[in-house]
Image (tube, rainbow, N blue to C red):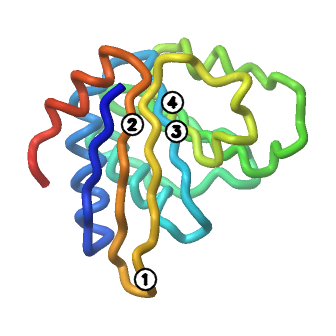
Amino acid sequence: MTEKTYQVTTPEETKRLAEKIALLLRPNDCLTLSGDLGAGKTTFTKGLGIGLGVKRTINSPTFTIVKVYQGEKTLYHIDAYRLEDEEEDIGFDDYFYGDGVAVVEWPQYIASFLPDERLDITINKVDDSDRRVITLTSTSDYFDYVIKEIPHI
């Protein structure tokens, strides 16, 4: 397990970090995004979309649970917030083991469905500014490699 922490000071830096990570991802990869409301999870996902070649505007799928964005690689954007206390599998395997990259906001609500191999990302606000601490934690050798290969932002 590898862990690496980044400090960013603007939403643009958050997006830039995510874009660099996206360039290292392959189909079937899963990333989880944890953090309080307003921490920057959707901002991070927008950067992933840029790196994956998505042209559409990315926004939070809170009310639809899953949004699918086509790019050079497909992006499955899952917001599990409304699934708290749900036990039903809504077809997660199609997203986690499909032909795209899955990013899951509020992963604690669907923990039993998450793949074992994934990149866990936690975003924490530092204060009332745009400063954030972003921590990447791998769960596999492949994501150890991804973390080590991320160029400096």
Q: In this view, does 7 lie above or below 118?
A: below
Labels 4 and 3 touching (C-beta < 8 A)? no
In the rendered view, tell whether residue 27 sits above or below residue 63: above
Judging from the image, what secondary structure is the residue with disc 4 in? Answer: strand
Helix, strand or loop under label 2: strand
Residue at image location 46% in from the left, 64% down from the top: 124
The quadrant in which the N terminus is found is: top left
Q: Position of residue 58 (x, y in %)?
A: 47, 53
**Mark-to-mark CA distance, 2 and 4:** 16 Å
- Look at mark 4 in the image and give the residue it sits on: 102
Q: Disc 3 marks which amino acid? A: Thr
User: Label 1 vs label 2: CA separation?
Assistant: 23 Å
Residue placed under numbered mark 3 in the picture: 32
Q: Indicate the quadrant where residue 7 lies.
A: bottom left
Residue at point 89% right, 29% down? 87
Disc marking residue 127: 1
Callout 3 touching callout 2 (CB < 8 Å): no
Q: Which amino acid does label 4 sit on?
A: Ala
State the image quarter where residue 14 is shown: bottom left
| Residue in view at x 46 percent, y 51 percent | 122
What whole-number distance in Å separates the C-alpha atoms at marks 3 and 1?
23 Å
